[in-house]
Image (cartoon, helix red, strand yellow):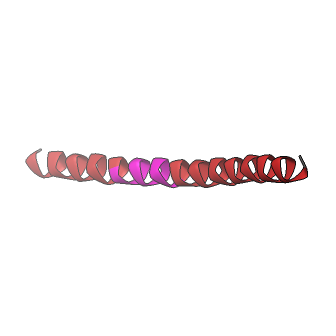
Amino acid sequence: MNSNQGGVKLSVVLFSVIVLGVMAWFNQANAESHHSIQEADEEVVVTSSSQS
């Protein structure tokens, strides 16, 4: 029974690490897409102010 509990603990730790890694990957991808949108907005502001 004790060896079984060790395996369960290891599985929970591995599952947690995988979930955190996936969450971090999605957060990074979301931040990069938000950054590109922000850059596009800044370019629009720059071009509209240069036209004035």
Residue with the most extreme front position: 52
The x, y position of residue 47, in whole percent, is 84, 53
Task: Residue at 42% x, 54% y: name it.
Answer: 21
Farthest left residue? 2
The boundaries of the magenta stretch are 17-25
The residue positioned farthest toward the right in the image shown: 51
Prevailing secondary structure of the magenta residues:
helix
Quarter of the image for the N terminus: give it. top left
Residue 22 falls within the magenta-colored stretch: yes
**Front-most of 31 and 21?**
31
Total residue callouts: 0
Relative to residue 20, is residue 13 drawn left or right?
left
Q: Is residue 27 left or right of residue 48?
A: left
**Left or right relative to 45: residue 6:** left
Between 16 and 27, the one lying in front of the other is: 27
Q: Could you tell me which residue is drawn at 15 percent across and 51 percent down?
A: 6
Residue 35 point in image, percent of width and height: 63, 52
Residue depicted at x 34% and y 53%:
17
Residue closer to the observer: 9 or 18? 18
Q: Position of residue 25 (x, y in %)?
A: 51, 55
Asked if residue 38 is among those painted magenta in the image, a careful observer would answer: no
Residue at point 24% right, 46% down?
8
In the rendered image, residue 12, in percent from the top left (x then y), is placed at: 29, 46
